[in-house]
Image (cartoon, rainbow, N blue to C red):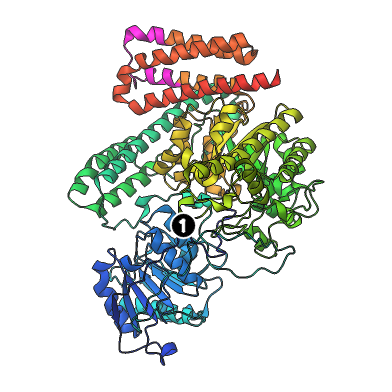
Amino acid sequence: MKNQGTAIKVTKKARFFIFSFNFLIVNCLTSFNILAVRAASEEPVLSVVQSTENRQQWTGITKRLQAIGVNYCVIPLSAVRSSGDWGDRRVLFLPNVETLTPAQAIALESWVSKGGKIIASGPVGSLSAPGVRQLLRSLLGSYWGFGLDETQQLKPAKTQPQRWANQTELFGQVRGGVVIPEGGTSQATAVWNAPDNPAAVVTTEWSTLLGWRWGTDAASTFELDNAWLKAAINHHLTAPSPGQQKIAGADSKCSTTIATASLNSPSPITPVIPQAPLVPRTSRPSSPEAIDQLEQTVRWNVEPNSNQPIDEKEAIALQQELENLISRVESAHLAASVHAANLDEAIASNPQSLKEEETRVASTRPGFASQSKEQAITQARLVAKNIPQLIANKNYALARQQWLATRTNLWKHFPTNRRLAPAEIRAVWLDRGTIVRAGGEKKLAEVFDRLAQSGINTVFFETLNASYPIYPSKVAPQQNPLIRGWNPLAVAVKLAHERDMELHAWVWTFAAGNQRHNQVINVHPDYPGPVLAAHPNWANYDNKGNTIPPGQTKPFFDPANPELRQYLLKLFAEIVSEYQVDGLQLDYIRYPFQDPLAGRSYGYGQAARAQFQKLTGVDPLTISPTQVELWQKWTEFRTQQVDSFVAEVSQMMRQKREDLILSVAVFPLPERERIQKLQQHWEVWARRGDIDVIVPMTYAQDTARFQRLAQPWIASSQLGSTLLVPGIRLLSLPNLAAFDQLQLIRDLPASGYALFAAENFNNDLLKIFNSTQGKVPSIPDEPIPLRQPFETAVVRYGLLKREWQYVLQNELVQIPAIKVADFNNQIEVVEKALNQLAAAPSPAKLLTAKASLTRFQSQFRIWMRDAATNNPYQVKVWENRLATIERLLRYGERRSQLRQ
């Protein structure tokens, strides 16, 4: 599901598609001199890619290339469609190429897997599709993070200095951007002389990424550019490349190659599974994990000076997102004002608690600009209004600059030093790495202290990872070897309950192993994990016979295998029986990512093939998506294996303990696509009542993308009484961007959020959480929706009531005088019904509460008709919060029925 740590580790080569096109080389230029290391060669050693983005910079690029004295060929980006080896040119240079297609990225990946090397500069691939960006990250071992506002001094990295990059001429004043290393083999070769010394140049064995637009005088000097390219070429040419094959008739200096992979039907599967740990080996880049293919980075986080055209659709989206952000800031301030009034009431009878609260808020107050919130919003509205005109006048760079500056300014005006959160699920995935680093109860207690103080009330504790339990198991063959001398699960349950937190055991379901974990524990990269090593007949395969799909890092179990299912049920039963966990979260409750139309499918385990053949008379390995009816049956068969297992886990848990919560971490892909590519149909699990909470991994680097992923599922009426809690990935996400996503969740009909992961919490983020949602000594602990849905409904409705009173008293919302009395009367009716239900739940009281709430919701639109004209966002927020209360009642009704 989620990437452990801060890196996407490169492993085996990955191919999403197979392309059989000639790699056409249009123009070959030979300079008069060559690098000393290649003095005896007459063939070019470098291929340089020309694109639409760098065409305007080509004069500067050409002058520098000719001055370096290296034979090179120019290749148009449009011709990069197959895996070419570029003759003897073992180095490919991508100067400031921002847009690549999937086919081009895959061709590069295939070429690198054969020994090719890549040098890139600037925001390479930043305007490409998300899957392409992720593939480039693994190829380059890094990516362009963001541009720097000013020229900075380039200087050597203090840690692990590299001899090939220590010459004086490599360092000077440059205008560029921060490069984010990604992968255990990535090294910062040069850094910026800025706070925290962020990386400016990152290298791996096969790549170098220069963090500025090489070849442009505005970014760097002629001499510095040449020094870096020459050093990088010499560095990469020291490693030998594998033999290369030229096409007959091709130019001797600019040869091309074609792909030799076959598209024939798959051969019979002959699995090979290593049975014993071995020493890990260095591996080539791989394509991203499935969740990384989903994750997007914001398009506007490109270099602000980029004049890339903005079309009409993007312009509208740009304007709308600023307007939505303005509304979120206003909504957050309204919530903070109401909480402040409530806090004043709570601490009035306790002067000492007032002093303590003032001290706590002061200690967490971030620095604010002198500009007021009202001024910032007024300025933002002017920018939003002006952006369409800038775009119409083709001032694209200025539009980007104003948009980014305005977004940043609005983020700074969120009330992050004031309490504003409602009663909600505040969950965090506590990852294996954090647990291992704790090393014992004392350090783990410190982790729980920080989480509890920051308002986190639910912990998904990584209990089973790559078939290794974190605790000493009587069912599993081996405990995680990184754990010695203590039982983290037992300790975590105690620590959580001492702090009034929920502790849910987070388990990997059908993912059997992990190549990244193998490296950590020093075993062979392809070791399938202790369970598959002992039971190889439980393994699953793709249509080529691989247990690990190309480009991925995890072997999977065969969900159709009855012995495997019984093993997992027994293991999960051990967890919920031997430990007082509050719930179980199923992760990897799916098949690995596939693309059937591209010839990549999965699920051909021995049991699955035998069962499907018995049902249909056909071996699934012999069919393809073109056989529509049979393929649909095969897809349904695999999906049902997952569906039925979720039902079995649910039944087992209800039999063990009725109060247990079952949650699932799932993909938010559209339903049909998800079934075809993952065989994960979680809508069915929700409608059947098998699960209590859905946690979609709605990971995104910008709030607009996050909203597009999360809102359809939050608004869905197809999930029965199941609660939905969107996931936010903190890795590489600025703190205020994370807060913006939290505010969006609070403005939508959602019951809370889940943060991935604990290891990505930083001190500044914890300060924000302490202020906005942390525990306050003078206020009783809030109810947790998972456990106390009716009490949560009361608390959330009370906040709504106070918001309405506040806006009416301050004349922020206008309701006709003739309707105000009826509005206030109906508020009291609903509040009374909810209070009576929470105090002593019964079917009759639940029916009364639901009826009064439904009646209030229908009248609310009438009362707020005028207000909706002036402030449609805030009125919609109130409607969403009423919908959240309605869902809590439905959820509470089902949970009550389970206990009867």
The spot of residue 857 in percent (x, y) is 43, 16
Counting other residues with Cα less than 10 Å from the Cα at mark 1, is it few (<14), some (14-19), or many (20 or more)?
Answer: many
Inspect the magenta stretch and tell me whether residue 459 lies in it: no
Magenta stretch, main secondary structure, is helix
| Residue at the disc numbered 1 | 134
Q: Which residue is pictured at 73% across the width and 32% down the height? A: 652
- Relative to residue 748, is residue 539 drawn left or right? right
In the image, 52 versus 809, the foreground residue is 52
For the question of whether residue 383 can be seen, the reply is yes
* Span colored in magenta: 803-823
Horizontal and vertical percent position of residue 314: 29, 45
The residue lying toward the viewer, choosing from 819 and 876, is 876
Question: What amino acid does circle 1 point to?
Answer: Gln
Task: State the residue lying farthest toward the left.
Answer: 393
Q: Which residue lies furthest to the bottom in this view?
A: 40
Residue found at x 50% / y 25%: 884
Look at the picture and state if 299 lies above or below 831: below
Residue 294 x %, y %:
47, 48
Left or right, residue 349 beside residue 53: right
Q: Which residue is drawn at 46% across and 37% down?
A: 710
* Image quadrant where residue 847 sits: top right
Q: Is residue 732 left or right of residue 691?
A: left
Observer able to see residue 731: no
Residue 804 counted in the magenta span: yes
Occupied quadrant, residue 584 = top right
Q: Position of residue 293 (x, y in %)?
A: 48, 52
Quarter of the picture holding the C terminus:
top right
Image vertical order of residue 558 relative to residue 217, above or below: above
Q: Which of 147 and 25 is in front in this view?
A: 25
Say what secondary structure mark 1 lies in. helix
Viewer-side residue, 390 vs 374:
390
